[in-house]
Image (tube, rainbow, N blue to C red):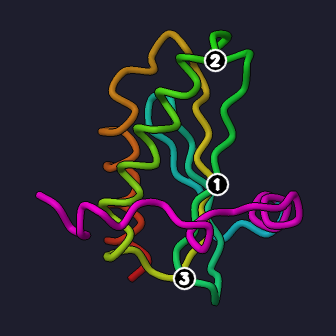
Amino acid sequence: MTLTPPNEGFPRSRRLLTAADFDAVFKHRDFSYRSRSIRLIGRHSPNGARLGLVVAKRVLPRAVDRNQVKRQIREAFRLWHARLPSVDLVVQPLQLDVLENPREQVESLLRRVVRERV
């Protein structure tokens, strides 16, 4: 089930880029959801749906694992972007021992955002 064209990618306009962007979401959050091992924090924004990732070395010590998780989270966001309201989202994996299928967990959290925030 593809919700956006497959060649759309993840352009800069859909990313939280600066520390100020991340701080705004953390300090002025409008909602926060959590699955078994992933936390999603959000804030309403006039800039359309944007994504920021915070993946700590403490949670995933190997860079290859951090990169794989980030790719899966970005893919989930890319597929759901068209349905999301105008929000800034920060996704943060929390626990290594229960971090299974991060894409499915993020999609579940994004479904909840769509259902409760639209």
The image shows residue 66 at horizontal and vertical percentages of: 58, 24
Q: Residue furthest front?
A: 7
Number of residues whose C-alpha sits closer than 10 Å to that of mark 2, classed few (under 14), some (14–19) or many (20 or more):
few
Residue bearing the label numbered 2: 63
The residue closer to the viewer here, 108 or 72, is: 72
Crowding at dot 1, Cα within 10 Å, few <14 / some 14-19 / many 20+, comes out as: many
Q: Which residues are magenta?
A: 1-26
User: Does the magenta portion include 11?
Assistant: yes
Q: Residue at x 74, y 15 (%)?
A: 58
Q: Is residue 88 magenta?
A: no
Identity of the amino acid at label 2?
Answer: Ala
The residues bearing labels 3 and 2 have C-alpha atoms spaced at a distance of: 30 Å
Separation of disc 3 and disc 1 at Cα?
13 Å
In-front residue for pair 103/34: 103
Q: Earlier in the sequence, mark 2 or mark 1?
A: 1
Disc 3 crowd, CA 10 A, few/some/many (<14, 14-19, 20+): some
The earlier-in-sequence mark between 3 and 2 is: 3
- State the mark number for residue 48: 3
Residue for point 65% across, 18% down: 59
Q: Amino acid at mark 1?
A: Gly
Horizontal side, residue 2 vs residue 118: left or right? left
Residue indicated by mark 1: 52
C-alpha span from label 2 to label 1: 18 Å
